[in-house]
Image (cartoon, helix red, strand yellow):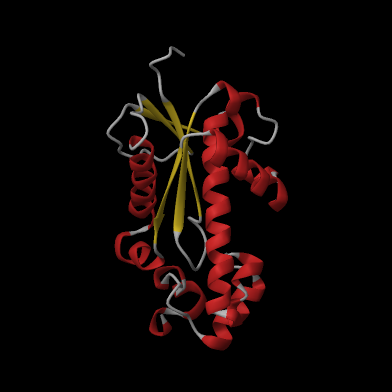
Amino acid sequence: MTDSTVIVGIDEAGRGPLAGPVVAGACVLTKEIESHPLIKDSKSLTHEQREEAFSWIEKNCTYGFGVVSGKEIDDNGILASTEKAMTLAIEMIEKVTTPTYIISDGRDKFWFNYPHSSVIRGDESEPCISAGSIVAKVLRDRMMTDYAKEFPEYKFEDHKGYGSPLHIEAIHMFGPCSLHRKTFLTKILGSENT
């Protein structure tokens, strides 16, 4: 990596839930990121470790994030919405530096304004993708915990909008709220109720 190389890792949180946004996180690769003990796949960290890692990223890294609502996911589909969230995250990075290469987690082929590639399980093998996954997961979890205050009956603080038995029971009891992805609920409620 030369001094002029700016590699950005990007990942998302929230593609699969029944409610809430999809959030993308992006982070510029540095030697410090490569060597930090808590920069690893966000799913392998505890809540406390993710918060600690995110706090370090905020202080020491160039990072960005993007948020796309459940309504937009219903309108445009999860793949297009994920790509939009990632583009918004990269736009935040662009305010500080110009990426030369983007690496994203997974197998999907997204379109960016820069050369890029997808790495299967990249959140486990590429530190800048791991950092992006931490940014996305921490910010999305915080958002869903805040939404729980507005919609306490769904207990979003417990499941973050994923299809847990507790969440599905609440949907059957109270019906969907404005955060729910109606297109994701058809198998649970049937198309006439969504």
Outermost front residue: 59
Q: Residue at x 58, y 59 (%)?
A: 141
Vertical placement of residue 122 versus 145, above or below: above
Q: Position of residue 114 (x, y in %)?
A: 30, 29
Q: Position of residue 62 (x, y in %)?
A: 46, 35
Q: Quadrant of residue 167?
A: bottom right
Outermost left residue: 113
Q: Position of residue 128 (x, y in %)?
A: 53, 31
Q: Residue at x 33, y 50 (%)?
A: 84
Q: Residue at x 57, y 60 (%)?
A: 142
**Residue 140 shown left or right of residue 192 in the figure:** right
Tell me if residue 34 can be seen. Answer: yes
Vertical placement of residue 147 versus 24, above or below: below
Vertical placement of residue 83 versus 95, above or below: below
**Residue 156 shown left or right of residue 111 in the figure:** right
Between 106 and 19, the one lying in front of the other is 19
